[in-house]
Amino acid sequence: MKTTIIAIVAAAGVATAADHTFDISGLSVDEGFGAEFFTMVHDFGFAGTVTNVAWDVNYEALGGSWASEAQIAIDTDDDASLDADVNPADYGAGDAPGVFAYSGSISAASASSNGLVYLTLYDSFDDAGVDHVYGAGSFVTVTYIPAPGAAALLGLGGLVATRRRR
C-alpha cells in the first residue's frame, strides 16, 4: 500500500509533454492580427507551459500581398501578446507574391494558467482581398508541459480512484 502511494505521488511530480497539431491546410488570410476567425484554440485542460513550436507550411501569397507578410502567432491565455511569432522573412520569404514553403521550430517558454493555447494566422499588411492561402499539408505543432501543480493534481486524482476501487 505504502509503495503504491509513494509511486503515485512520485509520478505526479513528473511532467509529461503533450503535443497538439493545428492543421492549417486550406485556410486563407485576408486580415491583420486580431481577426477572430483566424484564431484557432486548443484546450490542454490544465495549466502548463508551451516549450516548443514546430511548423511545416506552404502557402501562396496572392495579388499585392508579399510572401514575407504571412505571419503565424502562438499565444497563451489570449492576452494579445505574441508569445511565439513565426516570421517567414526570417526563412527567406521574399517581398513579392508567389508560393513559399518553410519548416522549422523555435523554443518557447510561455505559461498558460488555464490550459488554452491560441494559434493566429494573420498578414502583417492588410491588402485588399485574400492575402495568402495555406496549401495541403500545412501544420503547426505545439509542445506543452503541465505545470507541476497540475501534474500533482492529476496524480492525486489517480490515487483517489485507486482507493475507491478497494
Image (tube, rainbow, N blue to C red):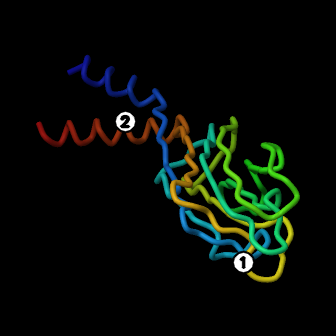
Which residue bears the numbered disc 2? 155
Of the numbered discs 2 and 1, the one sitting upstream in the chain is 1
Q: Mark 1 is on which residue type?
A: Val
Q: Nearer the viewer, residue 160 or 145?
A: 145
- Residue pictured at 54% horizontal, 38% vertical: 145
17 left or right of 59 in image? left
Residue 82 picture location, percent across and down:
77, 55
Mark 1: few, some, or many residues within 10 Å (few <14, many ≥20)? Answer: some
Q: Nearer the viewer, residue 25 or 162?
A: 25
Residues under numbered marks 2 and 1 in contact, where contact means CB atoms less than 8 Å apart: no
Which residue bears the numbered disc 1? 130
Q: Of discs 2 and 1, which sits in the foreground? A: 1
- Residue pictured at 11% horizontal, 36% vertical: 166
Residue 39 picture location, percent across and down:
63, 68
Q: Which mark is residue 150?
A: none
Task: Count the numbered circles shown.
Answer: 2
Q: Secondary structure at mark 1?
A: loop
122 left or right of 15 in image? right
From what the image shows, is residue 1 above or below residue 76?
above
Residue 155 picture location, percent across and down:
37, 36
